Amino acid sequence: MNWLIKGARIIDPSQHIDDKMDILIEDGKIVKLGHNLSPSKKRGMEIMELAGLVVTPGLVDMHTHLREPGFEYKETIKTGSEAACAGGFTGIACMANTNPVNDTRSVTEFILRKAAETNLVNVYPIAAITMQSQGKSLAEFWDLKEAGAIALSDDGKPVMDSAVMRRALEYADSLGLPIISHCEDTCLSSGGAMNEGFPSTELGLPGIPGIAEDIMVARDLLLAEYTRSSIHIAHVSTAGSVRLIRDAKNRGIKVTAETAPHYFTLTDDDLRTYNVNAKVYPPLRGKDDVEAIKEGLRDGTIDAIASDHAPHALTDKEVEFEYAASGMIGLETSLALSLRLVSADVLTLNQLIEKMSTHPARILRIPGGSLLPGAPADLTIIDLQHSWTVDRETIRSLSKNTPFLGWDLTGKAVLTMKDGVVTFDELHN
Amino acid sequence: MILERKDILGIKELSKDEILLILDTADSFIEISTREIKKVPTLRGKTIINLFYEASTRTRTSFEIAGKRLSADTINISASTSSVVKGETLLDTARNLEAMNPDVIVIRHSAAGAPHMLAGMVKQSIINAGDGAHEHPTQALLDMMTIRAKKGHIENLNIAIVGDIAHSRVARSNIYGLKKMGAQVTVAGPATMIPRDIEQMGVAVHSSLDEAIKEVDVIMMLRIQLERQHQTIFPSIREYGQRFCLSKKNISLAKKDVLVMHPGPINRGVEISSDIADGPYSVILNQVTNGVAVRMALLYLLTGGKA
């Protein structure tokens, strides 16, 4: 719990720091950043030499599915937490589409209790916007907030009724609860299995047009503008959404947005082999969309990178493509896939950490994302040169559904620390 | 020559030479079906399973007859797709069948890609007998065989495919095959039945039947699935028939010696009028006859036969 971290390159976007510095940690909190610090007199103070490595504020994944309660065969809060630590995360926000749906205090409390039992990562429950995420009647936002929910989302489903969404935005804003919108016009997307385009035409699979997302993004931006509330757009996947969000930001609408690594790494061409592990909602889009997502990340239109970690067991996936569950795990590959943006000069390392730590914490209004003195000692230690292969055997998530199996990646979290306690260590093991 | 592949999943993967090999082999098998004793011992001791997850009369019967004329043991399994949701998965079914050591599994399935999934999981040869809106390779092969038999060649022919292109596996397989063989292909149908970016497959697109069939050598009419009316992809059967029914009124726009084809089953008076379906241009029943020969050829080649 008491550490002197020496010799590392410290990146803290919240303080505009990118420098070789030392960090002094006492009682699980950051005490001081500085050059050539000496260990304090605290009992049990240990020195950690990290020359050649990068230390950042603990990564925060603002979009994770932990599947518990209800789908423990896919993932549990414990296995999800283990995967998160291995991926360098110290905080994760988990979506409400469990069974039962997290639309009541008791479910939120259950999640927090389970997370505390494991205590590897800060788990922040996101509660449902509507009861059972049916899109009809609002959940008890205030009570959920009191219980510990930090945001609201019917993720997995859109709130199709514009009047319900309007009321949700107004009510949530007054409580300071962010609304995270899953943007999908289900009338346009219904029955679809992949992005609509030339690949879907060739594969004979029912398509989901990009406008199914764009139209709902446009609606939600208008609603946010009208109600003067803030909104966060989840898993942006299309060029159209990026354009709409960029314009909205320029016009002063309080919008933030996230994308996931697969939306800037893969395209619908990667479904050519009917690879069920690449089946995801929103679906992998075309090359132009991927370029637009990268541009949106570069120019700040997209604030955050979230994994949209969506575990599914083999039995959910090993079926005909159209019947296969949608989603892929991402906690353990998110950082390495995002680091490819740094090597491709899309983002600086500083900007990347901003999008994977500082911004998500700020959007969700949760602690973390900063190494300011007094902050919890939540740290991610990254080896930028570490080459590794995504291997089914070493994945900690209970489910192994990722299209990146067998990929050679560079860069990895080698040590993760929460409240000054090491939660993952590949450096010394 | 031998066919060096384990499975026939689609025309897309086949080379022109492979298509020619299959068509030549099929030509040589056509005679067997005209004999008094319509059976040769070629595939004696081989087992062929027809695994049909979708209703089919023509294709399933055709595969069965093809196998039997070559003396293979053929077994038909009609499974309901609903069992995918409830009960045994396709993969488990396939593994069970695999354990009984058949030589070829013929599969039809409403889900695109189902045969590809099987092919990667079992050691037997898989023949795709139609997967969703993806491919129907044996249909395209029998269509090409029919065209070649009637016209002597496929190269440089102008061919129109008309109907619900978006939902048609027959259209996709034929586009791949006919393009490989050097034909020019036009597709036509209501705009709602033309899938996105189909031009990238190298075809011309028309939304008028008259435009599409002008001076063509071959017209392939596709079956309209009447239930799609409820998905609002077209206003009514009546209006479809008025715009896209091939009849005496419009057939004269095509070349004089045009071939009219249809994969069946036909909706008389909807996509094709009876006088055309039963008339002199129609080769619809030749297609069915050739279907048996093409499937014999594939079963023969996939089990190691030499052409």
Image (spheres, coloured by chain):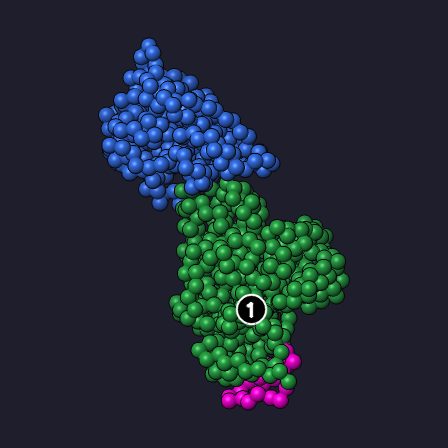
Q: Secondary structure at mark 1?
A: strand
How many numbered callouts?
A: 1
Residue sitting nearer the eye, B220 or A264:
A264
Q: Residue furthest top?
A: B36
Q: Residues within 10 Å of mark 1 (few under 14, many from 20)?
A: many
Residue B250: x percent and y percent?
36, 25
Chain for disc number 1: A
Up-down: is A69 above or below B126? below
Up-down: is B192 above or below A89? above
**What quarter of the picture does the N terminus of chain A occupy?**
bottom right
Q: Is residue A346 left or right of residue A104?
A: left
Does the magenta run of residues contain B145? Answer: no
Residue B149: x percent and y percent?
27, 23
User: Would you identify the image quadrant in which residue A181 lies?
Assistant: bottom right
Residue sitting nearer the eye, A34 or A132:
A34
Residue at image position (59%, 60%) is: A80
Q: Is residue A256 left or right of residue B194?
A: right
Residue at image position (49%, 72%) is: A427
Extent of the magenta region: A24-42
Residue at image position (56%, 57%) is: A397
**Residue type, numbered disc 1:** Phe
Q: Colour of chain A?
A: green
Chain letter of the blue region: B
Residue B167: x percent and y percent?
46, 36
Q: Is residue A79 left or right of residue A171?
A: left
Residue marked by disc 1: A424
